[in-house]
Image (tube, rainbow, N blue to C red):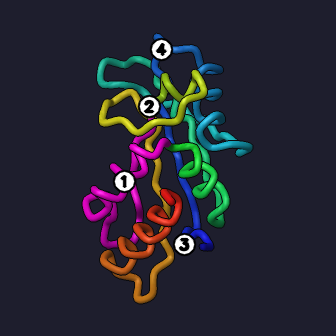
């Protein structure tokens, strides 16, 4: 089954207590060969925060990322798909940043994460249609 995805956007924050190269490596481990763009912002108390992002068109990077998830994480995505897709047909997930640095790609609910948004191609472009397409693709990956 061809991946029903049109783009992927990922973002991770690098706080002053973290090493930039390690956060970049975590993103690269999760997303594969992608170009990283870094911008700088400030936290509430004036602390420096780096925002490390990547954007990839087409479904290849999304398919690569999803292929790195464990069967239990794929099941969690399937079971929670309706809550992870918005009205604009975007699928959201959070990848554990520390585990990604260590080479393990896993979902997390924690704050120290790589935030991922995957655009799902659905016709009509409705949340329900996008959820069904994404779910069908994920189900095919579990067999």
Residue 80: x %, y % from top left: 28, 56
Residue 96: x %, y % from top left: 44, 31
Q: Which residue is mark 4?
A: 16
Q: Which residue is mark 3?
A: 4
Q: Residue furthest bottom?
A: 124
Residue 53: x %, y % from top left: 57, 42
From this view, report whether residue 59 is shown above or below residue 45.
below
Measure how far apart labels 3 and 1 are at the Cα level. 15 Å
Q: Nearer the viewer, residue 91 or 46?
A: 91
Name which of mark 4 and mark 1 comes first in the sequence. Answer: 4
> Was residue 56 drawn as part of the magenta stretch in this picture?
no
Q: Nearer the viewer, residue 18 or 77?
A: 77
Please state if 57 lies on the left or on the right of 143 as rendered: right
Q: Does dot 1 land on a helix, a strand or a loop?
A: helix
Nearer to us: label 4 or label 1: 1
Measure how far apart labels 4 and 2 are at the Cα level. 19 Å
Please state if 3 lies on the left or on the right of 135 as rendered: right
User: Tags 4 and 2 in contact by the CB under 8 Å rule?
Assistant: no
Find residue 51 and name its label: none
Q: Quadrant of residue 45?
A: top left
Q: Quadrant of residue 29?
A: top right
Name which of mark 3 and mark 1 comes first in the sequence. Answer: 3
Which region shows up in magenta?
70-95
Nearer to us: label 4 or label 2: 2
């Amino acid at each position: 089954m061809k991946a029903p995805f049109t783009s992927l956007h990922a973002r991770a924050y690098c706080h002053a207590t973290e090493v930039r190269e390690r956060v970049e490596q975590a993103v690269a481990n999760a997303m594969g060969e992608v170009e990283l763009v870094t911008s700088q912002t400030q936290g509430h108390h004036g602390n420096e925060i780096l925002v490390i992002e990547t954007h990839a068109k087409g479904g290849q990077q999304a398919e690569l990322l999803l292929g790195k998830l464990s069967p239990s994480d794929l099941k969690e995505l399937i079971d929670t798909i309706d809550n992870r897709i918005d009205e604009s047909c975007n699928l959201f997930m959070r990848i554990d940043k520390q585990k990604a640095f260590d080479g393990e790609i896993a979902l997390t609910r924690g704050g120290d994460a790589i935030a991922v948004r995957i655009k799902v191609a659905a016709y009509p472009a409705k949340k329900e249609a996008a959820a069904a397409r994404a779910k069908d693709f994920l189900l095919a990956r579990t067999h």
